[in-house]
Amino acid sequence: MQLLPVILSGGSGSRLWPLSREAYPKQFLPLTGTDSLLQATAGRLDGVADESSGELTLLPPLIVCNEAHRFLVAEQLRLMRRDPASILLEPVGRNTAPALTLAALAASSDGTDPVLIVMPADHLILDEVVFRRLVVRGVELAGAGKVVTFGIVPTGPETGYGYIRKGERLDPGDEGACGLDAFVEKPDRETAAQYIESGRYLWNSGIFMMKASLWLELLERFRGDIASVCKAAFGKGEADREFFRPDPALFRTCPSDSIDYAVMERLSGQQVQDVEAVVLPLDAGWSDVGAWSALWDVTQRDPSGNAIEGDVFTHEASDNLLIAKHRMLAAVGVEGLVIVETPDAVLVLNKARAQDVKEVTRYLKEANRDEHLFHRKVHRPWGSFEPIDEGSRYQVKRLSVAPGGCLSLQMHHHRAEHWIVVSGTAKVTRGDETLLLTENQSIYIPLGTRHRLENPGQIPLEIIEVQSGSYLGEDDIVRFEDVYNRNSQG
């Protein structure tokens, strides 16, 4: 049996602002270790075949992500030395049902019919051994034609999650597998407490397993409009390096719906007699890390209950989440706070009101600011850049170009540039010239001149760039050639 991990990486993670931004959301951040949440998800099933007593082949992961995040996904997988089956790019977000449909079409395009395990890219599972063992049982059930979902054994009356009501046990010795009786919307606290007391309810994890063909069959049955648009968009899609783009114009016409609403709720309670839906209870330290309070819950804390990252000093402070990314942070005599310091923003929040971060991002959007979109350091497929200083008609940036990285051949209508090599070797195209520059050497790029910067070396190339001119926006770029096939700014 083949098992294909399908990782859905379309979230924006806005409730973890200011660490998470739309251009670099939480799935790309190492919130609880050295790996990002995406990397942890991509490696979560390593060794699952060894847990199986039968023939089980784990296939390379298939990622579905936002077009704007494609190079972040590719780079994080490259750092893991892991080649994906494919990276499917959504031109626009249309929720999880169309995303899974694209994945199922890709999975079955070679005539095979693997079992899909659908996992959000931004969840945390602490006990991966327990998870893998449950996945092996899920493969057996899904391979037999069942639809499987994972329900999280609740630790309290949480109002931020949807719930699953368990039906009858499939078999007394069957690892707790039960029929799926119903999906329930997020309850109020009193109702959630009743759910916990009854022992019949689990949190909805958003993790599913089924054969690719079964998902396509069920979607055709229940949401034929989504199925037809996705098939047409996929059929007219194009491959680009490791990426695959469904036809953008067609995909934009696709209705938006979730896996739960489109299919799963219609299978619960045996509403559909020919397909059995099963829930597997999962007790493995799961968290969706959906808010700052959730991150505090899963982070190691000091004797005073403080979860600390970075250069932090505390005195008579307790039960706080304290993160310093750029400067020293001192917390004195405070309790139950979230304090997050980044180079361009500081958040101070009562931990009990973690959901209210949305008020900050709403303000930023309404004020036409960009702190909800970008970090101070902006990532590009060739590396990154970070502003250092700016004023009237000038701007200074630090550029870091990865080994083998190559900026586009471009020109600017409104600015000239001066590059100083801090470390590494730079290959510079300026008009008809090609030059190699090393540490402490510099070059001037006049306004309107075609130019390109490359790193031919084995170490990162660090450049100080001084821009001068009447307009210094990132959209003043005219591209002539680009190895990353970009046709817009970035």
Image (cartoon, rainbow, N blue to C red):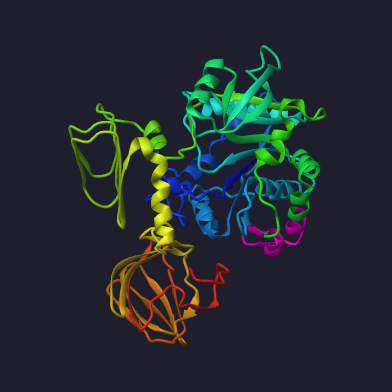
Q: Is residue 194 left or right of residue 258?
A: left
Q: Is residue 421 left or right of residue 153?
A: left
Is any part of residue 1 visible from this angle? no
The number of numbered badges drawn on the structure is 0
Name, please, the residue furthest toward the right. Answer: 274
Q: Is residue 441 above or below residue 185?
A: below
Task: State yes or no: residue 416 in magenta.
Answer: no
**Residue 238 in the image: x percent, y percent?**
70, 63
Q: Is residue 472 left or right of residue 54?
A: left
Q: Is residue 427 above or below residue 12?
A: below
Name, please, the residue furthest toward the top. Answer: 172
Q: Is residue 161 above or below residue 29?
A: above
Quarter of the image where one finds residue 468: bottom left
Q: Nearer the viewer, residue 107 or 263?
A: 263
Q: Is residue 313 above or below residue 439?
A: above
Q: Is residue 385 left or right of residue 13?
A: left
Is any part of residue 194 visible from this angle? yes
Quarter of the image where one finds residue 338: top left
**Residue 191 in the image: x percent, y percent?**
53, 24
**For the magenta stretch, what is the residue range?**
231-251
Quarter of the image where one finds residue 488: bottom right
**Residue 412 in the image: x percent, y percent?**
44, 82
Name which residue lies at 46% across and 40% down.
Answer: 290
Name which residue lies at 59% across and 46% down.
Answer: 8
Name which residue lies at 46% across and 66% down.
Answer: 405
Q: Nearer the viewer, residue 101 or 5?
A: 101
Q: Quadrant of the N terminus?
A: top right
**Residue 442 in the image: x percent, y percent?**
31, 78
Task: State yes or no: residue 235 in magenta.
Answer: yes
